Amino acid sequence: MPELPEVETVMRGMAAWLEGARITRITLSGVPLRRPYPERFAERLAGRQIMGFRRRGKYILMRLDDGMSVIWHLGMSGRVLRLEGDSLSPHLHFRLESDKGALGLIDPRRFGLLDLTETAREMDHPLLAPLGPEPLEKSFTAPALAGALAKRPGPLKTVLLDQRLIAGLGNIYVSESLFRARLHPARAASSLSPAETTRLTRAIKATLREAIAAGGTSLRDLVHTDGTLGYFQHRFRVYGREGRPCSACPGPGCCPGVQRVVQAGRSTFFCPRRQR
DNA sequence: ATACGCCCCTGGTGGC
DNA sequence: TGCCACCAGGGGCGTA
């Protein structure tokens, strides 16, 4: 599920619902996620009030009233859902009950994580400190991106997945952004002209904004805390569309269709005619 | 410092 | 129907 637009969507859903809520009880499944929970995690959260939410890259930060923040990462298959009654999923690993209702983290593959950190030093946390700029902030400009890409001889696709360069892009949105920027995924990141870097910067921002407006992407999973679906998957131009005509082509026979290649072990989708 | 393979884990899908 | 290989939106770690 979770690249930047999905995490943003989940975070907004949690914020609209749980800001100001008082945590009454925490229940853990006992099975660890990617890393063990912090010491006495459940006890430290019980009784706390939830003050606010923010997002950094693919992380959600939930600020509490005692100077601590809970760090959420959804991994590959993590979902955050409003729980009704005693709903038991075999993959419900974290259950938060509050005076505004109950919420659960469901994560079959357990690549997600939860951690606790001091709010004042959130950004110094070892998981957050290395993150690159937020692509939707004004400070994320073409010159800034050019500076980051200049040092990287690797292929664009792989380099853009590095969270230290830009925080929040994943496999879907890199393919979609490169299509939009008309850049070939195998191009050396350091080879872009200033005009191409400008195209790429705009493409990344536009792609992410559109996806957030669509409520993110729902492939196999629900995205929203209320159980509704994002619909950006219907707007994919290349992702998962191998062999189908490229959406920018005027008609049949214009291009050989969307191709799939594997880079650094992960699928990349692109149109070989449009992207150079 | 960087780049790559491998690992973590479960579930869905399609071929035989 | 069963079995199996392969694939999946994440990242970390060890090794060159």
Image (spheres, coloured by chain):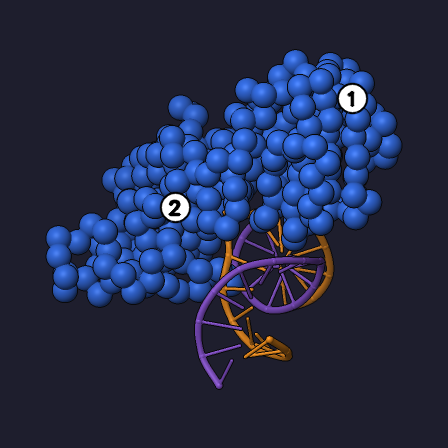
Chain colours: A blue, B purple, C orange
Res. A191 mark: none
Who's the residue at 43% across and 34% down the image? Answer: A215
Secondary structure state at the residue bearing disc 2: helix
Who's the residue at 69% across and 28% down the image? Answer: A102
The residue beneath circle 1 is: A24
User: Could you tell me which chain the residue with mark 2 belongs to?
Assistant: A
Q: Which residue occupies the foreground of this view, A239 or C15?
A: A239
Residue type beneath disc 1: Thr
Mark 2 near mark 1, Cβ–Cβ under 8 Å?
no
The quarter of the rendered structure image containing the C terminus of chain A is bottom left
Residue type beneath disc 2: Gln
A71 up-or-down from A68: above or below:
below
**A43 displayed left or right of A225:** right
Q: Quadrant of residue A19?
A: top right
Residue A67 in percent (x, y) is at 75, 17
Q: CA distance from mark 2 to mark 1?
A: 37 Å
Who's the residue at 69% across and 46% down the image? Answer: A89
Residue A205 seen in render = no
Residue A73 in percent (x, y) is at 63, 39
Q: Which residue occupies the foreground of this view, A134 or A61?
A: A61
**A129 displayed left or right of A259:** right
Residue C15 in percent (x, y) is at 70, 66
Who's the residue at 13% across and 57% down the image? Answer: A251
Q: Quadrant of residue A147?
A: top left
For label 1, count other residues whose C-alpha is less than 10 Å away and answer few (under 14), some (14-19) or many (20+): some
The residue beneath circle 2 is: A233
A18 up-or-down from A265: above or below:
above
User: Could you tell me which chain the residue with mark 1 belongs to?
Assistant: A
For label 2, count other residues whose C-alpha is less than 10 Å away and answer few (under 14), some (14-19) or many (20+): some
Residue A22 seen in render = yes
Mark 2 and mark 1 lie on one chain; the one further toward the N terminus is 1
Secondary structure state at the residue bearing disc 1: strand
